[in-house]
Amino acid sequence: MSKIYNIYLNGLLIGTTELEKADVPMGVVIGDLRFTDQKFGYDLLKEYCENNQIELASDYPEDKMISTTNISELKITNDKGIEIKGVENQITGMDKEEYEISIFGIPYPFYKEEFPHHVKDYENMFNKE
């Protein structure tokens, strides 16, 4: 059974994720972002970034597709309320498809404690003989 992580922006719950993808050596987890409300998406993200001087990595208004750089007020917590802290938290996606949340640079040993399944999957890639 997957863990569900809550995603907060400025203290407001905006969605959840399972952080189901990983780049273990880099301390990265990525997950599909499920917004709690249909109002969240491209327009709200772009407005938030503009109002808070957050640089966009890419922005395609005609497709409503966006990729942010670090959003410091984006907090991701596990089921015990413990924040998953990394160096950067980013959102990427488009309204007609889906959005992903990425957390980069999560330190060890916390990474291994919180995401043992990702670490195990990574280690198993080298033990297939």
Image (tube, rainbow, N blue to C red):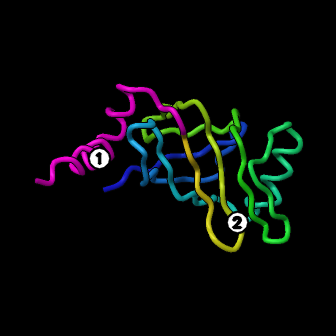
**Residue behind mark 1:** 122
Q: Nearer the viewer, residue 73 or 27?
A: 27
Figure check: 88 above or below 50: above
Q: Amino acid at mark 1?
A: Tyr
| Residue at the image position 54 percent from the left and 46 percent from the top | 6
Q: Specify whether residue 79 is painted magenta.
A: no
Q: Amino acid at mark 2?
A: Met
Q: Nearer the viewer, residue 59 or 43?
A: 59
| Residue at the image position 69 percent from the left and 74 percent from the top | 96
* Snapshot quadrant of residue 87: top right
| Residue at the image position 43 percent from the left and 35 percent from the top | 80
Figure check: 41 above or below 89: below
**Residue behind mark 2:** 94
Question: In the image, which residues are magenta?
Answer: 104-129
Query: Which quadrant: the N terminus?
Result: bottom left
Figure check: 78 above or below 22: above
Report x, y in % for residue 44.
Answer: 81, 55
* Mark 1 Cα shell of 10 Å, populated few (<14), some (14-19), many (≥20): some
